[in-house]
Amino acid sequence: MQIRSWFQFVRRESENNSPWRFLLCFSSSSSSASLLSLQHSHPTNHRISSSTCLNLIKPTAFASHHQWYASIVQSLTSSTQPSRILYSYEHAATGFSARLTAGQASELRRIPGVLSVWPEQVHEVHTTHTPHFLGLANDSGLWPNSDYADDVIIGVLDTGIWPELRSFNDSELSPVPESWKGVCETGPDFPACNRKIIGARTFHRGYESALGRQIDESEESKSPRDTEGHGTHTASTAAGSVVQNASMFEYANGEARGMATKARIAVYKICWNQGCLDSDILAAMDQAIADGVHVISLSVGAKGLAPKYDRDSIAIGAFGAMEHGVIVSCSVGNSGPKPFTAVNIAPWILTVGASTIDREFPADVVLGNGRIFRGVSLYTGDPLNAPHLPLVLADECGSRLCVAGKLNPSLVSGKIVVCDRGGGKRVEKGRAVKLAGGAGMILANTKTTGEELVADSHLIPATMVGKTAGDEIKRYADSKSSPTATIAFRGTVMGNSLLAPKVASFSSRGPNRLTPEILKPDVIAPGVNILAGWTGSNSPTGLDMDERRVEFNIISGTSMACPHVSGLAALLSQSSP
C-alpha cells in the first residue's frame, strides 16, 4: 500500500540555527514505520490525488497516531533545540506539524519517500443591503425554500467573534443540530456559546512557535473573542441574525442580516496580530471537518503569488474537506488589478472575488471656481469650519502619499490636503494630515486604482475621488494663486445601477498561474462598502488614536465577498441537499 507523503518546515528567519516547524503525511504498513516511495502527479497539473492522505495504517506497536508521530520526531538526531509536535491531523490531512531544528529538517529531507520540504507561510486576512441586491426575498425563492439554512453549520476561520452582538442573537433558532460534534472553549472573556454561535475554538500553537513565546494577553485575547473585527464582520455577513435599525453612525441605516440568517456559526480563531500560520489554519480545517461543519468560510490567503497546491495548507485542507463533503469558500485576495495575483485557486476551492453594490456614500469636492467632483466618504464628525478652505497638494508639502511625520505642518495647517492613494492604508493618510494640523483631505486615485471609489470612516473631513477628478483638482490647485475647496457630505444614496455590479479594482485577478485551463475566481460577490457586525474592542479605522466604537462597521475587501458566497452555499446545501 502506498500513500503520498509531504512535509512542511518553517525556519525562523532571525537565526540560521533556530527551530523549524514541519507537517508530515507518509506511508506505512501495519508492521513497519518505514516510508515507502511516492507516486508523483503529473507536473503540469499540480493535483493532489485522492490517495494523498487516505487509508493510513498505523503500526500496531503504537496506541495512537500522535504517539507514532512523536516516535518519528524522537528518532531524529539529537539537538540542543527542543523538538515537539504542534498538531496531529486526521481529517483535512493525515500527519502532523512539529518544531525541529534546521539540521533535523535536513535529515528528514533525506528519508526515501519524502515528497517535499518547504517553509510554512504566514497568511493574511483579505479585508445590509446586499441580500436584496442579490435577489433574496422572504416570500419566495432560496430563503423560504431552505428555511434560511436552519440546520447548516458554517465554520468561520478568522480572527474570532464578538458574541454579544445582536447579529448573533439566537431567539428565533431551533435547538443545535444533533450532528454537531464540536465544543465551545469558554473562559473569563468568552463565557458561553448559544444556538447561533454553537462552537468556538482557538488555534495558536504555530503562531506561538513562530513568536518564540506565548501570546501576550495584554495585547490580544487568547480566547475565541475577536479583538480585531475582521472575523466578526465575516461571520455576521455569512450567517448573522436579523437586526433592525442597524447602521454605522447613521450611514447605511436599515435592516442588517446575514445571507443565511438561521445557519449556525462555528468559530475557529486562526489569525492573530501578526498573521495566520499554515499549521494553525490546517489544524482548524481538520477540526472543523471532525466537528461536522457543512461549509468552511475562509477569508484568508497567501501573501504574494499563490503557492503550489502541494505546498498550500489551504489547498490541502480544502481537498480533505471536499472528500468529506464540506464546501470551502475562500477569498481571492486584494492584489488587483494586476494579472496572476489570484490566490486560493485550487480547482476544489470556491474562489470569490469582490464586486461593487448599488449603494454609495457621496462626499463631493466643491472647488473655489464652483466645479463639483464626485467623491465618497464615511466621515461622521463636525463639518469643515468654513465655506471654503485653502487647498494644497501633498507633494508640495513633503509627502505626495501623505506619510505620517513627513508633511510640513507650516504648509498644511488649516488647509485641505490633496493626497495620492497608495503606499499605505487610506485612513492612515487622514491621520497623517490630522497630526500635521490639516483641516481636511482629498484622497485622489492614481492610474493603478482608476475610478473606483471606496468609502472610509476617516478621523478628519475627507473624501476619495477617482483619477480623472483627482487630476482636475490638482490642475486647479496648480493654476490658482490661492486655490480653495470644501467637502459636502451627502449621507447614503441607494439604487445607482450604473455602479454595480462591477469587479472591484483591488480584487485579485487571474489567469490561474498554476492551472491556467481552470478560470479563477469562480464568482464575484459584494465586497465594497459592506455593513456588518464589528468588535467592541477596536475602532472602525483600527487606528490607535481613534476612540470611537461601533456595533456595525462598513469595510471593503474580498474578505467581505467570501462570506456572502459561504452563506449562499449554506442556503443551497439545505434547499438542494
Image: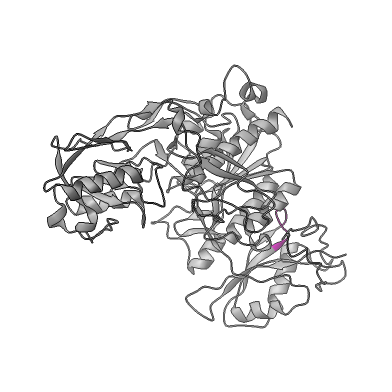
Residue at 62 percent across and 58 percent down: it is: 513
Residue 496's quadrant in the figure? Answer: top left
Left or right for 5, reference 269: right
Left or right for 430, reference 149: left
Nearer to me, 287 or 47:
47
* 150 over 509 or under it: above or below: above
Q: Position of residue 42 (x, y in %)?
A: 77, 63
* 11 over 132 or under it: above or below: below
Left or right for 22, reference 25: left
Range covered by the magenta-colored residues: 90-95
Residue 486's quadrant in the figure? Answer: top left
Residue at 65 percent across and 63 percent down: it is: 311
Nearer to me, 90 or 115:
115
Q: Position of residue 291 (x, y in %)?
A: 67, 45
Nearer to me, 406 or 73:
406
Q: Where is residue 73 in the image (x, y as percent from the top left)?
A: 69, 74
Predominant SS along the magenta part? loop
Q: How many marks?
A: 0
Left or right for 530, reference 239: left
Nearer to me, 556 or 398:
398
Q: Is residue 136 magenta?
A: no
